Amino acid sequence: MKKNSSGSGAILEIKNLSVVYRHRVMGRVYAMSDVSLSVNEGEALGIAGESGCGKSTLLKSILRLFNPWEIDSVSGEILYDGCDILKMTPPELRVLRRGGISMIFQHPYAAFNPVIKIGRQLDETIRLYGCRREAHELLETCGLDERIPEMFPHNLSGGQLQRLQFAMALASGARILLADEPTTSLDAISQFEILKLIKKLVEKESLTLLFVSHNLSLIKYLTSRAAVFYGGILVEDAPCGELFKNPLHPYTDALIRCIPRPGRELGVIPGDSPDLSAPASGCPFYSRCSYAGELCLGKVPLMRTYHKVRCFNAGPDEVSEQR
Amino acid sequence: MIELKNISKTFYTEKGPFFSRGKAKEACGNINMTIGAGEIVSLVGESGCGKTTLARIISGLIPPDSGGVFIEGTALEKYSPLRRASKVGIVFQNPHESLNPMLKSGFIIKEAVKNRMRLGEKMPPELSSVENIFSEFSLDIKLASSRPGCLSGGQRQRLAAARSFAMFPSYLVLDEVTSSLDVSTAASLIKLFKKINARYGTAMLFITHDLVLAEIISERMYVMKDGEIVESGDTWEVFGRPKHPYVRQLKSVGSGLDI
């Protein structure tokens, strides 16, 4: 694989990615349109949005985990170390999945083979990927005890299996972790334990993390930058401190208000999420937005450069004004 | 008022040799609880602590080993299944599994309304037709002719709630209704339940693993751990001054994630 010679520090760069699915009933589904995003090495990026907003599509396209028959078209570029993942051949993809990028799935019980003992599954990963660390060391790093290899997946709790997925990812020697809502099927306390583990791993192993969640409070806890998706487009992309203090897109603002907090009235976003099989020409949030004007109906503005946001109401671009 | 008196339930996890029963696991042990008319009570606990078992016992889906559930002084098992559904409704955790995929959503609601009519009990006029129930649960009436497979998670959960509510029960058990939904969908569902409670005076038992959510929705709460209730009382008291270490831990987790 070629190394990135430009020295921009970006380990993963997504340029104008559009994904269209083919659906038996709905026809074409425009799951993702014109998304540009870059992730620096060692950075933790949070990806937020409701279900059906394209979060999982983004992760799937990074690892090319599509079924060929469900895809209508994919355009754009995903650069990993300067190589376009979308143009990789199967052997190159295997190398990518082996040592480059690893995925943590949402449902812990679906991520393991139910009839093979954990130890064998872990050993297989270690052997195949040539990991230099021993199984018990990986288990210890992820806070699991030594008896785990003798057990089957059904003997373990959801939280333990989720930890095990992280051990597997470490065994494969991944540099980038893609975590697809790893805590949604867990209860409050084990969710917090997993979050602490992720935070520890990212700091200690200097991993790059893409953490997908619909809950912005988890993203605030874990990551330094957040990207908010709505209806298949990236609507806001800013450092967490900035995003939570001063959310510029009305959708981000509404999403923050929806998080239950003691002593605060719960906010509600009226209406349902948009139908992606018939995308509107304007802003997808138009019908649910309280600030929507005539401009929003026609088109979506381009991304601003500093506090990246795609909304007409966010005000002019600070950087371009200074010029 | 629903009263739970000394409810216990034990499950046997594995089969032993021959016909003997295997390891016993006590899901609920000696639980006493009351839900007053028209109030929202929440039940907080981690997974595997017996919340769902208790929800099933209250709604009469499984019998308790000992103790009894009393609705306005009458034991729950005295009611016929249909009559019971008109007293206590239940909404399950997973909307993908709780709805029959073969039936159209309009039919699902119509069946409940018909059963209600068969009992000959009075119904507020705004709940007498399928259209009204759909609009009450902010579902588009166009969805009545589609099957649950075509609906989103939030719409399915609203449909499941509408199905239970179409029997117009005086008590509604909400078993982790928001746990499989997005934050924003969950927020609108909670608002909906609060509206229903205020308008029709339906008492609700809101079961959740999130202490903060329980604080927002309910006036009174019970905290459960390992099949036993470890703390109960008014929400402001339990949330503001937790006594049991487990509740303190839950609260610290909640405040660790505060934005």
Image (spheres, coloured by chain):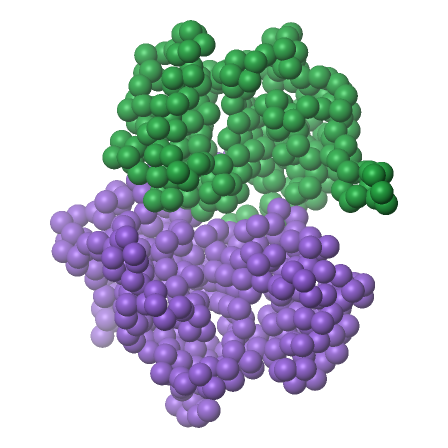
> Where does residue A119 sit, x and y in percent of width and height?
73, 69
Chain that the image shows in green = B
Who is closer to the viewer here, A72 or A294?
A: A72
Q: Say which quarter of the image contains residue B18.
A: top right
- Image coordinates of residue A298 in percent, x first then y, are 14, 56
- Numbered disc total: 0
Q: Quadrant of residue B36?
A: top right
Location of residue A160 with respect to B240 vertically, above or below: below
Tell me which corner region of the image, top left, top right, bottom left or bottom right, holds residue A258.
top left
Q: Indicate whether B78 appears above or below A230.
A: above
Residue B22 visible (yes or no) = yes
Quadrant of image for the N terminus of chain B: top right
- Camera-side residue of B163 and A83: B163
For residue A279, side relative to residue B58 (left or right): left
- Of all residues, the one furthest to the front in this rendering is B18
Q: Is residue B33 left or right of residue A234?
A: right
Residue at point 36% right, 75% down? A14
Q: Work out whether residue B200 can be spotted.
A: no
Q: Which chain is purple?
A: A
Residue nearest the observer in this picture, A103 or B141: B141
Residue at (78%, 64%) from the top-left corner? A150
